[in-house]
């Protein structure tokens, strides 16, 4: 078939909206009509050329929601008409990783996904002249129709609006999951969230859900205060307005250090501050932000010897097929909010404007509606 898609032709160039060829689903694969897709940081990271593993030409996009159109041979868990959210972290439920409760990093399709290919080692997308186009993070949601492995789709309820739940495909689940699945934060805890963007705001609402007593937000941009307060932030700190070292200031504010800190900036200096602002003896710091290629973190080992832990999370530690449908329910039940964070809605033709808005820090989340 043919479908309209925004294609990343090469690094550093805007996406080009065009018709492309899409082959039908093979063994274990599913054809999905994408109804809405969010524009997230890593799409821009890849398009800009900063990602050393970035491949071209490719159809980017890893945050979306849509409807199953056709299932390939052997597909048992989905049927045409089912509503789904694509998963850049699959859940096969049978690999060594899926069987270990300590991780969500299913490895079943990891190798081919990283090469921009389907599990059989080929691509379903091509240019009208036949040039192959690569998949991206197993999702390629910047296409009106896309093909994914069955294990890379979460089936969700049919009354949930696509233009909102697409955000659960990355930002919402990453932020809330980091609190509930990775940190397993307890009622009454104190926490600090560094970076109040599309991820940090969801960490804040995850902490509110967990029953945290104190939720300190840290950001260089005071324009983030209003939204963060709405989502549950109790104290705001602008590092530019703190005289002297930020660590003792935060330790004092949290009465000895935070039980949990979260980096949602991707800045390695911030990651160090986040670790050191943890409480002696038990504080845990969780890295969510993806740092530039080759970056390194450092601290004095004494910080760890004295009982602080440094951890990280991918996709909030969520097991997509199991946890994403629950998060959609939480949204529909009013336990979490999404609507105020979707600051812009655009047609596919304007997708590059969405990247500009993100770059300028003007959007929390821009969503493309097909
Ligand atoms: P964003 O740009 O919307 O937000 C980042 C925020 O950090 C901004 O508000 C900015 O003002 C603030 N900031 C920047 N430098 C700062 C500093 N030195 N001190 C304090 N605040 C600072 O980005 P986002 O969409 O929220 O994503 C945040 C990070 O999370 C990115 O690195 C992204 O790649 C990563 N991410 C990771 C995962 C995962 O699974 N681990 C998933 C999604 C996103
Ligand atoms: C999503 N991310 C950033 C913004 N939006 C993001 C980027 C990378 C990861 C998670 C979220 C990530 C963390 C750890 C890994 N990845 C490796 C997991 C593994 O090796 O099993 C990651 C993922 C997918 C891909 C690359 C890196 C990919 O498909 N190319 C989950
Ligand atoms: Zn993302
Ligand atoms: Zn698995």
Image (cartoon, grey):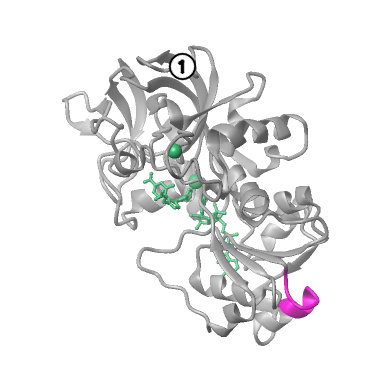
Q: Quadrant of residue 125?
A: top left
Determine if residue 188 is in view. Answer: yes
Q: Is residue 257 above or below residue 194?
A: below
Quadrant of the rendered image containing residue 326: top right
Q: Is residue 26 above or below residue 227?
A: above
What residue is drawn where x is 40% and y is 64%? Answer: 292
Q: Which structural element holds mark 1? A: loop
Kindly tell me whether residue 345 is visible in this rendering. no
| Total number of numbered discs in the rendering | 1
Instruction: Give me the residue at 58% from left, 77% from top.
Output: 304
Between residues 4 and 71, which one lies in front from this camera angle? 71
- The residue beneath circle 1 is 76
Q: Nearer the viewer, residue 255 or 322?
A: 322
Name the residue rendered at 72%, 40% in the picture: 337
Residue 108 vs 30, above or below: the answer is below
The residue depicted at 31 percent of the width and 40 percent of the height is: 8
Locate the N terminus and report the quarter of the image it occupies.
top left
Q: Position of residue 137 (x, y in %)?
A: 39, 41
Q: From the viewer's side, name the closer residue of 135 and 41.
A: 135
Question: Is 256 included in the stretch rendered in magenta?
Answer: yes
Q: Is residue 245 left or right of residue 51?
A: right
Q: Position of residue 25 (x, y in %)?
A: 33, 19
**Magenta span covers which residues?**
250-258
Q: Residues within 10 Å of mark 1 (few under 14, many from 20)?
A: few
Out of 173 and 109, give the one closest to the viewer: 109
């Amino acid at each position: 078939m043919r479908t309209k898609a925004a294609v990343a032709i090469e690094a550093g160039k805007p996406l080009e909206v065009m018709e492309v060829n899409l082959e039908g689903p093979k063994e274990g694969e599913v054809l999905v009509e994408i109804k809405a897709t969010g524009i997230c940081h890593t799409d821009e990271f890849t398009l800009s050329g900063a990602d050393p593993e970035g491949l071209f030409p490719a159809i980017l996009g890893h945050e979306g929601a849509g409807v199953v159109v056709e299932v390939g041979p052997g597909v048992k868990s989905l049927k045409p008409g089912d509503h789904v959210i694509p998963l850049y972290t699959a859940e096969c439920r049978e690999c060594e990783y899926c069987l270990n409760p300590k991780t969500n990093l299913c490895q079943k399709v990891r190798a081919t996904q990283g090469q921009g290919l389907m599990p059989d080692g080929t691509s379903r997308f091509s240019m009208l002249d036949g040039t192959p186009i690569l998949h991206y993070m197993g999702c390629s949601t910047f296409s009106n129709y896309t093909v994914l492995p069955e294990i890379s789709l979460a089936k969700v309820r049919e009354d949930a609006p696509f233009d909102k739940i697409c955000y659960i495909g990355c930002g919402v689940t990453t932020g809330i999951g980091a609190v509930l699945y990775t940190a397993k934060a307890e009622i009454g805890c104190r926490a600090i969230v560094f970076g109040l963007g599309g991820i940090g705001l969801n960490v804040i609402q995850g902490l509110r859900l967990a029953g945290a007593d104190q939720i300190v937000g840290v950001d260089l941009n005071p324009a983030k205060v209003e939204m963060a307060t709405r989502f549950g932030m109790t104290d705001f700190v602008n590092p530019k307005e703190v005289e002297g070292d930020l660590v003792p200031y935060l330790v004092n504010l949290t009465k000895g250090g935070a039980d949990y800190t979260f980096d949602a900036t991707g800045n390695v200096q911030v990651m160090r501050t986040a670790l050191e602002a943890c409480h002696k003896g038990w504080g845990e710091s969780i890295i969510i932000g993806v740092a530039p290629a080759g970056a390194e973190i450092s601290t004095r080992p004494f910080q760890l010897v004295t009982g602080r832990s440094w951890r990280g999370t991918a996709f909030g530690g969520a097991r997509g097929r199991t946890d994403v449908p629950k998060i959609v329910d939480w949204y529909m039940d009013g336990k979490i909010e999404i609507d105020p964070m979707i600051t812009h809605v655009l047609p596919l033709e304007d997708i590059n404007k969405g990247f500009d808005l993100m770059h300028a820090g003007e959007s929390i989340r821009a969503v493309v509606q097909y």
